[in-house]
Image (cartoon, grey):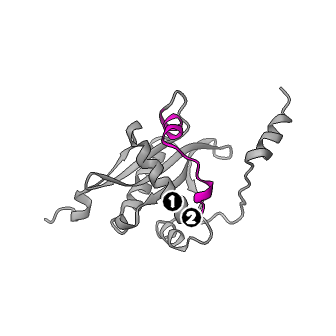
Amino acid sequence: MPGPPRAAMTTQIRPARADDCELIVALIRELAEYEKLLDQCQATPEALRESLFGQRPWAECLIAEQHGQGVGFALYFHNYSTFLAKPGLYLEDLYVRPAARGLGLGKALLAALAKLAVERGCGRFEWSVLDWNSPAIRFYESLGARPQDEWTIYRITGEALNTLAKQAQT
């Protein structure tokens, strides 16, 4: 009986550790460059370490390794569905370095997150994708993911966020 494909024997998905923060920031910057958003990337290893491993972790991360080298990541956190009355898992970013693509690492990261969502009793697993990123869209749809076209994401940041916060009654 044949064993697993050679690529599968030299790859693994594992939870990130605090000493991975420099790698994760490098991968985040590569993703930001690909998405043409590098000018907006402010992530530092120190800030990420606090966010992922500090007193109040805000997110979690998986690392994809090939031959012992980190070549991809999936950063995620929990959200909540009031309609389902269950937590959800939200994938903030997924990235695999170009040289490691085609080995199934992206799918392995998503499968690991889907398994985690099921184990944690989540009612859904979701993420956003840039509308021009057709390779990612084709990949996600090949896995059974479907766009939620009836929803539009709104975001408030920076000075607008600060202005709104000042209007809170405490």
| Residue at x 52%, y 47% (from the top left corner) | 76
| Residue at x 50%, y 30% (from the top left corner) | 54
Q: Is residue 76 above or below residue 108?
A: above
Report if residue 40 lies within the magenta region.
Answer: yes
- Helix, strand or loop for the magenta stretch, by majority: helix
Q: How many marks?
A: 2
- Dot 1: element: helix
Q: Decide: few, some or many residues near mark 1? Use Cα within 10 Å; few <14, some 14-19, many ≥20.
A: many
What residue is pinned by disc 2?
Answer: 35
Residue 35 horizontal/vertical position (percent): 56, 64
Q: Is residue 133 above or below residue 53?
A: below
| Residue at x 63%, y 46% (from the top left corner) | 84
Q: Is residue 1 left or right of residue 23?
A: left
What residue is pinned by disc 1?
Answer: 31
Report how far apart the C-alphas of labels 2 and 1 lie in the structure: 6 Å
Residue 8 horizontal/vertical position (percent): 26, 60
Q: Are marks 2 and 1 in contact (CB under 8 Å)?
A: yes
Q: Which residues are magenta?
A: 36-53
Tag 1: residue type?
Leu
Q: Is residue 66 left or right of residue 89?
A: left
Q: Nearer the viewer, residue 170 or 143?
A: 170
